[in-house]
């Protein structure tokens, strides 16, 4: 099936998310859509899938104009989509999720569970997806959940499959498996639209690449283009993909965790006895696939969740039972994973957000009153220093782009004298320009002797920043390795494959 | 440094007990200790151990039997002490065995309490003393509206709509059941009228919650206030029998439902008369429990309703209309809630009087939560509350406990039950969240 998009435009009020997009996806082609966060890729796909109605333009399937007013219409025309945030009901079984909307029934709408399970099993075998129909979805690893999503599209006989940022949650090995599945589908004649912002992947799997920037297609190219060329096309200027970083001798351990255990509200252990040392003047990166306990580890280091076991010391002093505020006052800087819920108050101005954890200090208060003058001066200085792009200091943070929001958080945390900086996913949903800037600031902190702990699920980021890499899997640190460890090896560790490589990479452990 | 010295379990967890587990054990020990202590006091305070009892709903002088209160109370105490010791040694974990042990502990406490309450009565001329009677028939009677209301709540919440307004549906159901029964001179017509009134309130709830995305808690409270005011107003418009006997008889003198005794089944000892000598409404209630369970878990409609309550966007992306599923579940819930309301007029006392349900809609709501959003669980919880109401009635014949305090006891039990025994539960993920297309 051939899919054509002609002059597709979507406006939200005065904001144009997609501006006259032209795109052709041939039958049996893997077409990559490359673009930064906020470039308009998801808007485009949501129009293709009937979730949004285009303002202008048309969609043609095999040369015939179509209009989708709901996802049901798109499904009927053979379009399937795997969303970035999975559209699976976590408490249902695989078979129930696959069947939903196209249930096998007997008589007056009675579920035929056996038929649904059989259908899943058959398709799973045909495409070698190894998915168990009776498993409950929330108990499955994300990689398998994603295959369930692909199955869902396949049972609906999708001829064009849209994959929206499918690799964001996968280990390198799972990514390779996904690529293999994509190639098999392609061989069967399925067209695939593969959305991503990761340059490496684009070149590995695409037949053709369209780059989208600020709502416009700025170029279509072949996968032979170099990463630098693609990056330049995506961002609109030359990009420095490597962070300038000098060798530096690490000092004594500053932040130490011993046998930390965290239990989630449902009673499962999510951090299972983690021990870590972060040393002065080094960047320790915690790598791992989302959901292997990194979030909870960071929260327990900050005191946002209580550790059920183990201890935390900061510069030799036990802080296991300190409140989060006490820890911040001891010099821990914190860039949280989910900035919009934990990092700033969206409806507060930039000015106020820049002093959220500083307003008690002598500089910004006089008795019970805030020193508004000083706060305003501080805002001007930080906006300048951190290159925060905003109309004014009184703009609400919620109105800024992701990159500028993150710069506000980083600026605030770095305006105190720090001994430790803990940053979780510091550049998630941030544009390339801001990524460069934030990375430079993090390295600058390290060079001043701050102990830096970075948690990241993006291996590129880990390699850009790390002096040492701790890999987490299933709530444990499976190994700590050097920054020149090959990608494949770290990928194996991220999948918990420590036992298979045991004895081979122990020499890498420079702790 | 990556190696940890802490001992581990087979699943890779560090071998420590988390606070929640410790808390659970502490809670069990404390509750059992309090129960044991109270039963000990009950046992010690019984002077004259002779107590009359019967398995029938009413005591008769010729069939009632006697028991020794000391034996019963001390056995109950013994059971509680054993359970307490097991809990202290952490031998009672989760699962159905633990459930049975706690059920037994509840019974033991109840028995100990009854011994104290009914012992040492002042001799009454002719009958000697008041007997303990079988509380189950009364329990089923009281549970009927609660179960129906809880089913309505469960259906709505499973579809992602919080229904606080069960109480309002009860009131409207009660009123229009009375009117319909009076007009048609038929109790069955009353049930139909009640169900329709319940659906009417449900359609208001659905309209504002699903179409206009109004906060469902506020909406529910407002609907209750509306229903209370409206039924009071309408009642005021009906002339009393003295003012206009003809009109009054057409509007608020309903035919009530008579108990229907099912042969054979009603002769089962203890349970038979409780379950199978009830009105049509109770039989409808049994059928409704089975129907809702079957609909939710065995049909296509149920799968979609549950999906809509968990992850509406996932349902939308496979081409199913979210709003339509929610509407259908809320309206069907209205049928059950309206039938539950009918209990308060044609199902029991007859004519509608101001606020007949008197807060029982909220108890039904509590049953939804205590029953963990499952129709069977909700039924069990509603039956427990029905049992508390029946016990209140049974105890009110004696004045050992102040009657005002006694009438508050079922509600106190509700709070304790919901707070203490609900444990870790997960409501439907999208419950109370309006679905907005992006």
Image: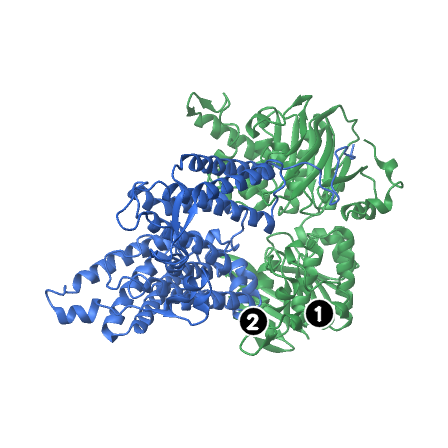
Chain colours: A green, B blue
How would you rate the neighbour count of disc 1 (Cα within 10 Å): few for under 14, some for 14-19, many for 20 or more?
many
Position of the N terminus of chain A, as image quadrant, is: bottom right
Circle 2 chain: A
Spatial CA distance of label 1 from label 2 is 19 Å
Q: Position of residue B293 (x, y in %)?
A: 51, 65
Residue drawn at 64 percent across, 32 percent down: A301
State the residue lying farthest toward the right: A504
Q: Secondary structure at mark 1?
A: strand
How would you rate the neighbour count of disc 2 (Cα within 10 Å): few for under 14, some for 14-19, many for 20 or more?
many
Mark 1 or 2: the one toward you: 2
Tell me which corner region of the image, top left, top right, bottom left or bottom right, holds residue B346: bottom left
B382 shown above or below B78? below
Q: Position of residue B75 (x, y in %)?
A: 51, 42
Q: Nearer the viewer, residue B216 or A378?
A: B216
Tell me which corner region of the image, top left, top right, bottom left or bottom right, holds residue B170: bottom left
Q: Which residue is mark 2?
A: A72
Q: Is residue B275 left or right of residue A389?
A: left
Q: Position of residue A467 (x, y in %)?
A: 77, 34
Which comes before the other along the chain, label 1 or label 2? 2
Q: Which residue is mark 1?
A: A191
Residue drawn at 30 percent across, 61 percent down: B344
B215 shown above or below B336? above
Residue drawn at 45 percent across, 59 percent down: B270
């Amino acid at each position: 099936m051939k899919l054509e998009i002609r002059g597709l435009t979507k406006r939200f009020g005065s904001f144009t998310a997609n501006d006259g997009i032209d795109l052709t996806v041939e039958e049996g082609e893997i077409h990559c859509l490359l673009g930064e966060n906020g470039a308009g890729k998801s808007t485009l796909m949501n129009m293709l899938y009937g979730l949004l109605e285009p303002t202008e333009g048309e969609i043609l399937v095999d040369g015939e104009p179509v209009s989708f007013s709901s996802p049901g219409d798109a499904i009927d025309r053979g379009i399937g989509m795997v969303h970035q945030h999975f559209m699976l009901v976590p408490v249902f079984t695989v078979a129930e999720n696959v069947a939903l909307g196209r249930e096998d029934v007997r008589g007056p709408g009675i579920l035929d569970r056996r038929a649904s399970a059989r259908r899943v099993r058959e398709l799973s075998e045909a495409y070698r997806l190894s998915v168990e129909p009776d498993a409950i979805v929330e108990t499955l690893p994300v990689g398998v959940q994603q295959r369930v999503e692909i199955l869902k599209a396949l049972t609906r006989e999708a001829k064009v499959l849209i994959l929206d940022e499918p690799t964001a949650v996968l280990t390198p090995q799972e990514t390779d498996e996904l690529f293999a599945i994509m190639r098999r589908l392609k061989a069967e004649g399925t067209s695939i639209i593969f959305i991503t912002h990761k340059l490496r992947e684009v070149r590995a799997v695409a037949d053709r690449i369209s780059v989208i920037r600020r709502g416009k297609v700025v170029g279509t190219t072949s996968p032979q283009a170099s990463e630098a060329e693609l990056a330049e096309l995506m961002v609109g200027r030359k990009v420095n993909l490597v962070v300038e970083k000098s060798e530096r001798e690490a000092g004594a351990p500053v932040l130490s965790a011993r046998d930390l255990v965290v239990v989630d509200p449902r009673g499962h252990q999510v951090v299972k006895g983690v021990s870590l040392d972060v040393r002065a003047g080094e960047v320790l990166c915690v790598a791992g696939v989302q959901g292997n306990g990194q979030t909870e580890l960071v929260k327990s280091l900050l005191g946002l969740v209580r550790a059920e076991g183990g201890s935390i010391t900061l510069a030799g002093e036990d802080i296991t039972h300190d409140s989060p505020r006490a820890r911040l006052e001891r010099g821990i800087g914190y860039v949280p994973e989910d900035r919009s819920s934990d990092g700033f108050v969206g409806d507060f101005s930039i000015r106020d957000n820049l002093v959220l954890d500083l307003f008690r200090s002598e500089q910004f208060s006089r008795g019970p009153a805030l020193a508004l003058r000083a706060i305003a001066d501080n805002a001007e200085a930080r906006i300048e220093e951190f290159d925060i792009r905003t109309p004014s200091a009184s703009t609400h943070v919620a109105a800024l782009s992701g990159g500028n929001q993150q710069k506000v958080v980083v600026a605030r945390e770095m305006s105190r004298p720090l001994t430790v900086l803990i940053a979780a996913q510091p550049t998630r949903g941030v544009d390339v320009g801001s990524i460069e800037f934030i990375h430079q600031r993090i390295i600058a902190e390290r060079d001043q002797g701050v102990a830096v702990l970075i948690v990241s699920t993006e291996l590129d980021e880990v390699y850009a920043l790390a002096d040492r890499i701790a890999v987490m899997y299933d709530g444990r640190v499976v190994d700590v390795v050097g920054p020149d460890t090959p990608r494949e090896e770290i990928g194996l560790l991220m999948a918990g494959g420590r036992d298979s490589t045991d004895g081979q990479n122990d020499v890498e452990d420079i702790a | 440094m990556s190696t940890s010295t802490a001992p581990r379990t087979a699943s890779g967890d560090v071998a420590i007990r988390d606070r929640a587990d410790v808390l659970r054990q502490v809670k069990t020990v404390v509750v059992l200790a309090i129960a044991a202590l109270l039963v000990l006091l009950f046992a010690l305070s019984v002077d004259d151990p002779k107590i009359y009892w019967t398995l029938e709903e009413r005591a008769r002088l010729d069939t009632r039997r006697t028991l020794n209160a000391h034996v019963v109370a001390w056995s109950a105490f013994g059971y509680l002490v054993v359970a307490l010791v097991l809990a202290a040694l952490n031998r009672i974990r989760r699962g159905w065995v633990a459930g049975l042990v706690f059920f037994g502990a509840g019974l033991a406490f109840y028995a100990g309490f009854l011994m104290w309450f009914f012992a040492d009565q002042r001799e009454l001329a002719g009958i000697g003393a008041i007997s303990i009677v079988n509380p189950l028939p009364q329990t089923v009677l009281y549970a009927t509206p609660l179960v129906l209301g809880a089913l309505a709540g469960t259906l709505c919440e499973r579809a992602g709509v919080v229904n606080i307004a069960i109480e309002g549906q009860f009131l409207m159901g009660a009123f229009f059941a009375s009117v319909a029964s009076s007009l048609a001179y038929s109790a069955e017509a009353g049930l139909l009228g009640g169900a329709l009134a319940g659906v009417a309130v449900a359609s208001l709830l659905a309209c504002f919650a699903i179409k206009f995305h109004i906060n469902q808690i506020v909406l529910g409270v407002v609907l209750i206030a509306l229903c209370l005011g409206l039924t009071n107003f309408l009642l005021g418009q009906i002339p009393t029998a003295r003012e206009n006997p003809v009109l009054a008889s057409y509007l608020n003198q309903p035919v009530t439902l008579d108990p229907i005794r099912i042969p054979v089944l009603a002769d089962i000892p203890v349970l038979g008369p409780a379950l199978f000598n009830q009105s049509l409404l109770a039989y409808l209630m049994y059928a409704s429990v089975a129907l809702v369970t079957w609909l939710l878990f065995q049909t296509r409609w149920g799968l979609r309703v549950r999906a809509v309550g968990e992850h509406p966007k996932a349902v939308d992306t496979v081409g199913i209309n979210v709003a339509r599923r929610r509407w259908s579940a809320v309206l069907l819930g209205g049928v059950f809630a309206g039938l539950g309301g009918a209990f308060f007029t044609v199902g029991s006392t007859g004519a509608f009087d101001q606020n007949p349900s008197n807060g029982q809609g909220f108890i039904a709501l509590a049953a939804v939560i205590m029953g963990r959003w499952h129709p069977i669980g909700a039924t069990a919880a509603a039956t427990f509350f029905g049992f508390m109401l029946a016990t209140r009635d049974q105890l009110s014949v004696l004045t050992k406990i102040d009657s005002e305090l006694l009438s508050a006891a079922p509600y106190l039990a509700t709070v304790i039950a919901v707070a203490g025994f609900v444990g870790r539960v997960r409501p439907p993920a999208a419950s109370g969240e309006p679905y907005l297309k992006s």
